[in-house]
Image (cartoon, helix red, strand yellow):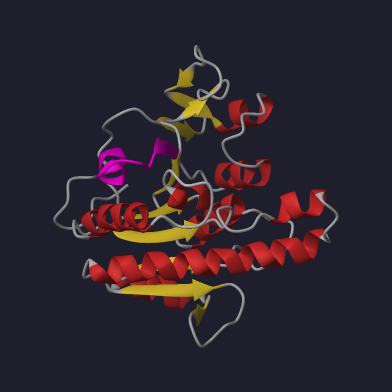
């Protein structure tokens, strides 16, 4: 791993996965502007160090295809609706980043040329080389794949040094720490441990894709000023998922 010019963080290029739920703040639905602004400030601070940043955002704060399918909606149609929700979130984050003075591009896996560029791998790489933050919207563009899988796919395509997953809790636990008081947090896990223990940090396709590409995954709590930057520096609680020795 090489260091970016002017930074001691040790990463050249990273992908940040932000869940749709993270954008809700303390709300039960939709987008909390203050939370979006906080996350944008954090991304801007990291980009300002010279680290190249790309982002994948979920859409669960607006629509979940899997939940809709459970209520009788066609799964593929539900997933496409969920992809459109991620575009809304991407535009919100883009606007917040640009207010921080960061040049940003939204690239969509579903063509919508009026509001986003089409996803083209070489163009995305070039944007980041020029210091722009690239936000990947619409997942993989295919139903039946989560935005976690999209994050692992884009991180591999962009040849990122690591995938940072910002969540509601400060790492991977053996049970939901919001429901189980004595839940244990793991400092480090292997990909196979995540799969064999069925730990619900990312879906199996995302973990397998990361494993195939030896892509480290760092799971941290995205809430709080500077959370992303601290995780990049290796500070604070988090869980690192890597290949076993």
Nearer to me, 2 or 42: 42
Residue 138, position as x, y percentages in the image:
58, 67
For the point 62% across and 76% down, the residue is 110
Nearer to me, 29 or 236: 29
Highlighted range, magenta: 217-231
Q: Residue furthest left?
A: 6
Residue 215, position as x, y percentages in the image:
48, 45
Residue 30, position as x, y percentages in the image:
51, 57
For the point 30% across and 66% down, the residue is 97
The answer to whether 11 appears left or right of 88 in the picture is left
Q: Residue furthest top?
A: 182
Is residue 42 visible in the rendered image? The answer is: yes
Magenta span contains residue 7 = no
Q: Is residue 137 above or below residue 171?
A: below
Nearer to me, 122 or 185: 185
Nearer to me, 48 or 20: 20
Q: Quadrant of residue 103?
A: bottom left
For the point 67% across and 46% down, the residue is 205
The answer to whether 198 appears left or right of 29 in the picture is right
Is residue 131 visible in the rendered image? The answer is: no
The answer to whether 145 appears left or right of 173 in the picture is right
Residue 221, position as x, y percentages in the image:
39, 37
For the point 41% across and 67% down, the residue is 92
Magenta span contains residue 226 = yes
């Amino acid at each position: 791993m090489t260091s970016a010019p002017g930074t001691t963080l040790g990463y050249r290029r990273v992908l940040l996965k932000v869940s749709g739920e993270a954008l809700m703040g303390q709300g039960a639905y939709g987008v909390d502007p203050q939370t979006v602004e906080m996350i944008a400030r954090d991304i801007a601070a990291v980009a300002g160090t010279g680290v190249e940043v790309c982002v994948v955002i979920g859409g669960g704060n607006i629509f979940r295809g899997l939940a809709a399918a459970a209520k009788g909606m066609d799964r593929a149609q539900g997933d496409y609706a969920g992809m459109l929700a991620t575009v809304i979130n991407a535009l919100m984050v883009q606007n917040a980043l640009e207010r921080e003075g960061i040049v940003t591009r939204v690239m969509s896996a579903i063509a919508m040329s009026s509001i986003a560029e089409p996803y083209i791998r070489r163009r995305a790489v070039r944007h980041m080389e020029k210091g722009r933050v690239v936000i990947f919207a619409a997942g993989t563009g295919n139903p039946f794949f989560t935005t976690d899988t999209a994050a692992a796919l884009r991180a591999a395509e962009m040849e990122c040094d690591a995938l940072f997953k910002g969540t509601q809790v400060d790492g991977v636990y053996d049970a939901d720490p919001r429901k189980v008081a004595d839940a244990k947090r793991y400092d480090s896990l292997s990909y196979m441990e995540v799969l064999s223990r069925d730990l619900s940090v990312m879906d199996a396709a995302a973990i397998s894709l990361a494993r195939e590409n030896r892509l480290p995954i760092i799971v941290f709590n995205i809430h709080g000023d500077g959370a992303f930057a601290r995780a990049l520096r290796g500070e604070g609680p988090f869980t690192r998922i890597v290949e076993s020795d």
